[in-house]
Amino acid sequence: MTKRIKKIGVLTGGGDCAGLNAVIRAVTKSAINQHGLEVFGIEDGFEGLLHNRMHPLGMEDVSNILTHGGTILGTNNKCNPARYHVEVDGQMQIQDLSEQVMGHIKSRSLDALIVIGGDGTMAVASNFARRGVNCIGVPKTIDNDLESCDVTFGFPTAYYVATEALDRIHTTAASHHRAMLVEVMGRNAGWIALYAGVASGADIILIPEIPFSIDKVCEKVTDRSRHGKRFSILCVAEGARPIDGEQVVARYDHTSADPVRLGGISRIVADQIEKMTGIETRTTILGHIQRGGSPIPQDRLLATAFGHAAITTLMAGKENRMVVMQGRNVTDISLYDVVDKQRLVPMDHPYIQAVRDMSISFGD
């Protein structure tokens, strides 16, 4: 017999993005209005579960947060209770504190968790799913790289912000006759760069899935200049890399489950363009501006649909599922199916062919 659900916890894990509060709102209102559940907001992701920091969420708590960026619960992109960094006698040790979390879940009488996050958050959630906690995942990442999900909330706002930045850079590039590079986020996936590059009319788009030749990049910039286009716009994914080259690592954070922090490839490419072509070149790295601010309407709709679907999925008696968008429909898949996987831009994506047919360069 399926266990009756009375009380649930909801948390936001990983990096912040636009739409988190919209999901919290949809989860809380659907749970209370339709099913009479008690909802507890877990503070700062799995850190809150580890240290038993959570509080009740009512209708007033989630009122008027649909348009707000960030998350009212706080988040954490480092805490994995199964591999928690603890200082012992001045030395950092990694300990498995999963049972401590399980104790807090039991003491709060939580029947299920609504876990909002990306692949790292789902990987952590899967540990507790295997220990008997029913975890319903909601896909969140600006990178848009979660397996079996056509679009994740946070992504539309991120590429909208990147597109607007490229639009503004365009006028400066034209005025000063420069090559201008805008570096966007995305880790190993080129979704933000591809969508923002196409939407802004970039001349060159560099994504991780298509290693580039700096000679080809410079050839495109020079060719535009030769034919009267005295400027070029390049949209560069942080994970882009040259043929036979490596991704550029900005730093390592060994306290994180994913210690690699990419960034800086655009500066290297800009230096090479200026040296090889003689054309003045500048770089803008957008960074965390892509995560912040109010979600655009598409993200508010996605987040609301996902939050509502998470409660519907839970109350239908399903266990350890993640709600996803496939085509125009919200459905659900096994939580375990997304762990340690990334959805990269496929080479048969229609935008890839469109870009090539319009003589926009991928640098290959």
Image: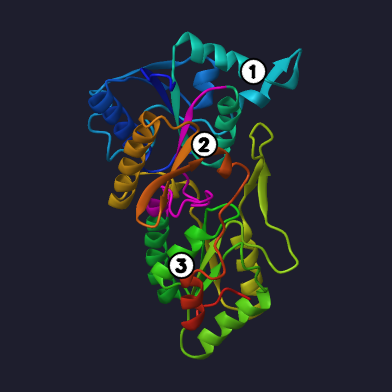
User: How many angstroms separate mark 2 from mark 3 (CA)?
Assistant: 26 Å
The numbered mark at residue 197 is 3
Instruction: Give how far across and how far down residue 102 sits, in percent.
Output: 56, 16
Find the magenta span and give its range: 132-158
Say if the magenta span includes residue 343: no
| Residue at image point 42% right, 57% down | 159
Say if the magenta span includes residue 145: yes
Q: What residue sits right under mark 2 in the picture?
A: 14
The quarter of the picture where the N terminus appears is: top left
The numbered mark at residue 97 is 1
| Residue at image point 27% right, 34% down | 65
Amino acid under label 2? Answer: Gly
Vertical side of 350 occupied by 152: above or below: above
Amino acid under label 3? Answer: Gly
Asked whether the viewer can see residue 39, the reply is yes
Left-right relation of 345 to 41: right
| Foreground: disc 2 or disc 3 | 2
User: How many angstroms separate mark 1 from mark 2 (CA)?
Assistant: 19 Å
User: How many angstroms separate mark 3 from mark 1 (CA)?
Assistant: 44 Å
| Residue at image point 57% right, 69% down | 347
Dot 2: few (<14), some (14–19), or many (≥20) neighbours within 10 Å?
A: many
